Amino acid sequence: MMRTWMTMLTLLLICVGSTFAQEAGRVSSQSTARPIPTVKPPSPLSESDKAAAAPLPAVIAETPGAVANSAWRNPNEAIKTASAYSSDSTAAPMSSAPRSEALPPSGSLLKVKSGLNELPHDQGQVWRDYDITPYTLRVTSTSKPEQAIIDWILRETGTDVWFSEPLGMLHADKNTLRVYHTPEMQQIVRDVVEDFVESQAEVKTLGLRLVTVKSPNWRRLAYRMMQPVSVKTPGIEAWLLSKENAAILLDSLRKRSDYKEHQAANLLIHNGQSSAVSMLKPQTFMRSVRATAAWPGYELQSDQIEAGFSLEVSPLLAPDDKTIDAVLKCSVDQIEKFVNVDIDVPTATGGTQTIQVQIPQMVSWRLHERFRWPSDQVLLISCGVVAQPDMGVSTAASFPLSLSLPSGPARADGLMFVEYLGPAKSKPGQPAITPDAAAIDNRGRY
């Protein structure tokens, strides 16, 4: 019995061992066909791998023919289609949007943009070119005859309209006047330019007479034949007289013992241009003293004052010569006396020396007015009781002088007669005997 159980146990162990041997052989064959890989640390990705691994952007649906562009676009800018990029497409019209040009950094807080592609016209501004050659080619008294046209336009319109809203521009050369402004302003410019062009730079004769009367009581008998004119400058009065009454008044003034005639001139002027007359007497004086290291230890500093009067006139007549528009500028400088002051200055030897310097005591008056009156009448201007011009030397060459001037400081009522005497005998465009207008100072001309 015991031997029987031992035999059955042996057979059972043999069966189990064969089964395990078969399973082990199967596992061994599988491990030989598919080896297990070795795990390595991850290597860094290259740039191309990063780009490939990046997520794709969302696709935005667009209308057919539109250009796909994910960059920012100005909402006022039209979207370019494929036809806009073709080689046979025409240039697009200029836009009022600022150009996106890159400007160099200035290194300051100032911001500068490249501007607009076209001029603003939000208030209806228009561009006009005026041909001014019928006038400029005939003026020979100055190298820049077009400047007179600019001056008269600014006198008529004022200067503020060209430097404020709306945007405007005014430019001229010898051939063309270019204006950019509203239609209303263009009409004013046109009227001024017509006065110049229609006259063809004809030479006009203007009579000027500067006189003084010590007492202003001449008005007592003259008021009844004078017509007052509006004047902006305080202390200045103006009247209009007929040519007959002007001759009567001038004759009565000449009979007075306090009457002095300082200047009488018939100026030949191209219509619209300027002419200047002056009688000046230079006077030198010792203005100051300055210490120096060289002997004698000081240096005198001198200066010069031109005493007398100067007169500038710019007339512009209408094409029919019935109305005259003139700008008058007059200045008088009179030296009453020099006040002497003693100054103690050190000398090279270590001592002091008294030096006398001079301080001028002056009286001056100015006139800058614009007048418009009928050309068949005479304009009379009174400057009030002012400094009387001293004797001087005339710088004009087109008129005789009357030099019965007082020798000392005086006060008198300054009177100026302005009269249009008609076209000059010289033909339009011939040189007139007037000072060079290019030498006139442009400051304060308006």
Image (cartoon, rainbow, N blue to C red):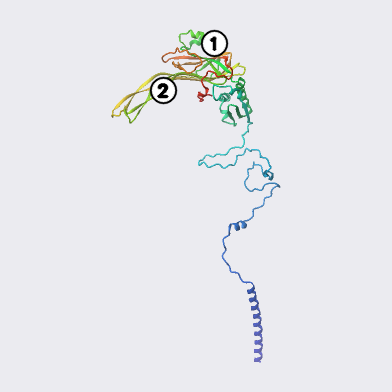
Percent position of residue 109, x then y: 51, 40
Which of the numbered marks, if any, corresponds to residue 246? Answer: 1
Hey, which quadrant is residue 288 in on the image? top left
Q: Is residue 257 above or below residue 16?
A: above
Tell me the quadrant of the picture where the C terminus can be found. top right
Q: Nearer the viewer, residue 249 or 144?
A: 144
Give the label, 1 or 2, closer to the camera.
2
Density class for disc 1 (Cα within 10 Å; few <14, some 14-19, many ≥20) is many
Q: Nearer the viewer, residue 122 or 430?
A: 430
Residue 267 visible in the displayed image? yes
Q: Is residue 59 above or below residue 238?
A: below
For disc 2, the marked residue is: 304
The secondary element bearing badge 1 is classed as helix
Which of the numbered marks, if any, corresponds to residue 48? Answer: none
Residue at 48%, 10% in the rendered image: 217
Percent position of residue 41, x then y: 56, 65
User: Would you say 239 lies left or right of 57 here?
Assistant: left
Q: Nearer the viewer, residue 380 or 232?
A: 380
Badge 1 amino acid: Ala
Badge 2 amino acid: Gln
Percent position of residue 47, x then y: 58, 57
Q: CA distance from mark 1 to mark 2?
A: 39 Å
The secondary element bearing badge 2 is classed as strand
**Of callouts 1 and 2, the N-terminal one:** 1
User: Would you say 23 lies left or right of 244 here?
Assistant: right
Q: Is residue 27 above or below residue 215?
A: below
Tell me the quadrant of the picture where the N terminus can be found. bottom right
